[in-house]
Image (cartoon, helix red, strand yellow):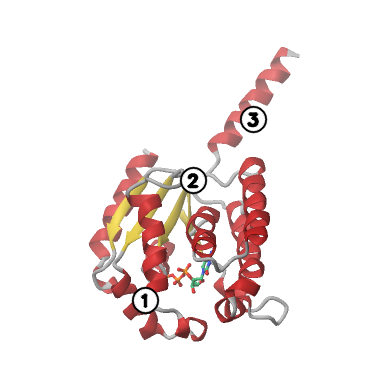
Amino acid sequence: LRSRSESFTKMARDYMNSQPFTVFVEGNIGSGKTTFLKHFASLDNVATLSEPVDRWRNVRGKNFLDLMYTDPSRWGITFQTYVQLTMLDLHTQVVDKTVKMMERSIHSARYCFVENLHQSGLMPEPDFIALDEWFNWIVKNHDVSGNLIIYLRTSPDVVHKRMLARARTEESCVPLEYLEKLHQLHEDWLFHRSSFSCPAPVLIIDANQDLNLMASEFSNCEAQIAEALS
Ligand code: DCP
């Protein structure tokens, strides 16, 4: 019995050790998360999980992202409920690499986007409560933890220009003011650490510069992740 118990303990330990080092890449809309992930996708031991924006734009033929921007008070809950589901899907996805790098997380969905809709009075209180109850249940009952957050820190006017330049149809009506509010929520959470709890240590990157010139910043991140793993 003892040896069975020992081998079970060993199995459990091996399982624990097989958990990947999980990184969340966070930052405002247009901060360069996609470019950042692309850089890491070429590394052998890194699995990159992009945010499922295309899934949000076509849910059985309905564009939830567009609905949310068109009428946030009506469709904000629908969109954010679906975002929460797709993010949970990414958090629980098993990967066979040492590092699992995710674009955003269920945490920024709640602490930045849902919070913004709620604070701006764009999400009715019962909608917010239902979403928050779901969020709390998920955090308690699923492993949505991470080992490192990389915060691509930007100024709202820089990301506003990038957003206009990439011209995603659904975002054509997003004003600078919206990005300013999102910026403040990211700042309070990840920079000042004065709002919500942070699920992992934060590495801050200046992402205002031209994204094509950020190779050295990316390499620096690579080095820091390698150090954390060693
Ligand atoms: N979005 C949202 N609520 C969320 C997550 C995203 O309203 N919980 C919206 C904001 C954007 C779109 O979805 O309109 C995609 O936003 P991201 O900032 O997550 O992705 P980007 O493509 O803008 O990232 P980047 O430009 O940094 O690569």
Q: CA distance from mark 2 to mark 1?
A: 31 Å
Q: Earlier in the sequence, mark 3 or mark 1?
A: 3
Mark 1 sits on what residue? 176
Q: Are marks 3 and 1 in contact (CB under 8 Å)?
A: no
Q: Residue at x 26, y 54 (%)?
A: 220
Mark 1: amino acid: Leu
Q: Residue at x 55, y 69 (%)?
A: 122
Q: Residue at x 32, y 42 (%)?
A: 227
State which mark lies toward you, 2 or 3. 2
Mark 3 sits on what residue? 11
Q: CA distance from mark 2 to mark 3?
A: 22 Å
Viewer-side residue, 186 vs 229: 186
Q: CA distance from mark 3 to mark 1?
A: 52 Å
Q: Is residue 230 visible?
A: yes
As drawn, the label of residue 163 is none
As drawn, the label of residue 146 is 2
Residue labelled 1 has its Cβ within 8 Å of some atom of ligand 1: no
Viewer-side residue, 209 vs 172: 172
Image quarter of the N terminus:
top right
Identify whether 71 is placed above or below 118.
Answer: below
Q: Residue at x 64, y 57 (%)?
A: 89
Are there few (<14), some (14-19), or many (20+) residues within 10 Å of tag 2? many
Secondary structure at numbered mark 1: helix
State which mark lies toward you, 3 or 1. 1
